[in-house]
Image: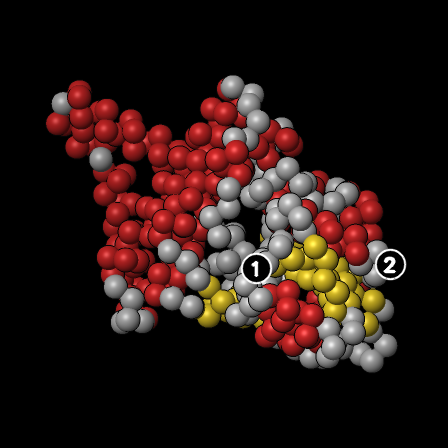
Amino acid sequence: MKIAVVIPCRNEVKNIEECIHAIFESDIPQSWQINVNVVDGLSDDGTIELLQSLQNQYPLLSIVVNHKKVTPIAFNLGIQAGDGCDYVQIIGARQVIDKTYIRKAVERLESDKSIWCVGGKVQNVFQNYEGKIIASAMSTSLGMGIGNFRTVEQSAFVDTVGTPMYPFWVFEKIGFFDEELIRNQDDDFNFRVINAGGKIFFDASISLKYYVRGNFQNLKTQFYQYGYWKVFVNRKHKAVTTIRQLVPPLFVVYLLLMALSWVLGSLVGSVSSTPLLIYFALVGYTSYKLQKSDRKMKFFDLFKTFPILHVSYGWGYLRGIVDFIILNKKPSDRNKALSR
């Protein structure tokens, strides 16, 4: 059996070595072969030189150049370089899989042919304080919505996963990642998987470490783009891909209408503010629980993260409706710039 591991990468000299070692140290049968394709987006921090040195240790490690430095292109280049393999495993450069990840993912796919995609549980390792705050908020149902793979604790069928494995034939059947999608390319692909009759499984028995880094400014941009590009995906498929994606834009519309309601008088304004007070109460309670679990995290930093997540995504989604649905425009260059 042959497994192709695809790693999109750019300027990850601090993390890529541990990622590579973990893959080649996987607990797999001797008859299995793992080929690792690191798709590098023109790194200039020493990543290439490090990878070249690792090739002396791992002959099945290949470097594929991604001149356009775009994530879905990296996915496709790596998958195409694995032509002839049985399975494709996609791993981030700051992710470190456990020894059984690949073996158990293959076993899950082979045990149920209706499953076309498997992903495991993420254990966050924080590289800075803001990254810890952000990841903590994103680990809650309030932060990311009910049913999001980041908040699921038990093995279950889901609509998308991180760090996915697919049988190679899935790409032959439904095509590759949409290279026009700077964001949400995985959501788009997994929506196509489900529409084609496949299932996506979150397996809580397999896990990986993820080195989280981040700051609030990048978070705003990132979630604005998630919302913005989600509408582009919806237009492409002529469908709303998940119900939970509608909550943030509806929340932003509510905020705008609530602000206008005060023009009608204090009574109307006060009544219309009630849902916002309930929202703040939920945010406060969730922030308190997170802060209680780790006293190093400040309550206000946790509290403000939730509105950043929701309003940024919602505003991006509304802007996407204007650009893609009302004006029928193409994505602007400004919204193609990555925040990470």
Is residue 282 visible to us here? yes
In the rendered image, which quarter is residue 257 located in? top left
Toward the left, the furthest residue is 266
Residue at point 60% right, 29% down?
Answer: 235
Residue at point 36% right, 36% down?
Answer: 251
| The N terminus: image quadrant | bottom right
In the rendered image, which quarter is residue 46 located in? bottom right
Amino acid marked by disc 2: Gly
Is residue 121 visible to us here? no
Callout 2: 10 Å neighbours few (<14), some, many (20+)?
Answer: few
Vertical comparison of 255 with 279: above or below: above
Expressed as whole percent of the image width and height from the top left, the position of residue 128 reads 38, 66
Judge left or right: residue 255 versus residue 31.
left
Judge left or right: residue 203 versus residue 307.
right
Judge left or right: residue 113 versus residue 200.
right
Expressed as whole percent of the image width and height from the top left, the position of residue 163 reads 62, 60
Expressed as whole percent of the image width and height from the top left, the position of residue 228 reads 49, 36
In this view, the mark in front (1 or 2): 1
Asked whether 54 or 106 is in front, the reply is 54
Vertical comparison of 129 with 237: above or below: below
> What mark, if any, has residue 84 been given in the picture?
2
On the image, numbered disc 1 is attached to which residue? 44
Question: Secondary structure under badge 1?
Answer: loop
Expressed as whole percent of the image width and height from the top left, the position of residue 126 reads 43, 68
Question: Secondary structure under badge 2?
Answer: loop
Residue at point 70% right, 66% down?
Answer: 105
Amino acid marked by disc 1: Asp
Callout 1: 10 Å neighbours few (<14), some, many (20+)?
Answer: few
Residue at point 12% right, 27% down?
Answer: 266
